[in-house]
Image (cartoon, rainbow, N blue to C red):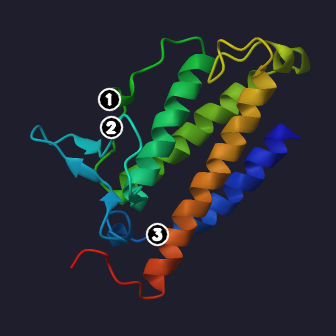
Amino acid sequence: MLRWQFELNWSLFELHLEALEEEDFLWEPAPVVWTVRPGADGVWVPDWAESEPDPIPVPTIGWVTWHIGWWWSVTIDHAQGRAPRDRTEITWPGNGKAAVEWLRGLRDEWLDVLGRLKEADLDAPAPFPWQDDPEKSVAHMVAWVNAELMKNVAEIGQLRLVRAAGGESGRG
């Protein structure tokens, strides 16, 4: 059931991924946004705050794709028994096409993780994001990935639709 749910979420994501244009990724939909920007060394980094700002920034599609890449990369690290990377080690690839390919690669890695799971594995303690909660299992982690992906897909879809419908940039 969890794999079916993931595949359903991913199929909805593909509808948006196929329709995205390069300009969609860095379009700023509001005056207060979080986006990705090239640093002095040319590496693209996300806007970030350790505590949620007020007002909460509206993310760009570029930022949301980085966010997916971050939480999913770290989850895969945990699921495969690797040392998890720090948030700052997960960088945006620099353009929309590369971001889409990155996310599709993470999907393939995740399908490998799911393909190795046996029924008994789902009851094991979650390695992430509840590694300190013995009541949370690997099944909880997989369900969390599905929920997080569904939320982020909806965000990307809404941003894409608003821009396609002629939404004005919040920056003027």
Find disc 2 in the rendering and name its residue.
91
Query: Hey, what amino acid is under mark 2?
Result: Thr
Q: Nearer the viewer, mark 2 or mark 3?
A: 2
**Residue at (39, 58) in percent of width and height:** 55
Q: Are marks 3 and 1 in contact (CB under 8 Å)?
A: no
Tell me which amino acid carries mark 1: Thr
- Name the kind of residue labelled 3 in the image: Leu
> Which of pointers 2 and 1 indicates the residue nearer the eye?
1
Q: Which mark is residue 20?
A: 3
Q: Is residue 167 above or below residue 18?
A: below
The tag earlier along the polypeptide, 3 or 1, is 3
- The residue that label 1 is drawn on is 88
Q: Residue at x 59, y 32 (%)?
A: 109
Q: Is residue 78 above or below residue 2?
A: above
Dot 2 falls on a residue whose secondary structure is loop
Mark 1 residue element? helix
- 49, 10: nearer the viewer: 49
Q: Which of the two residues, 97 or 132, is positioned nearer the viewer here?
A: 132
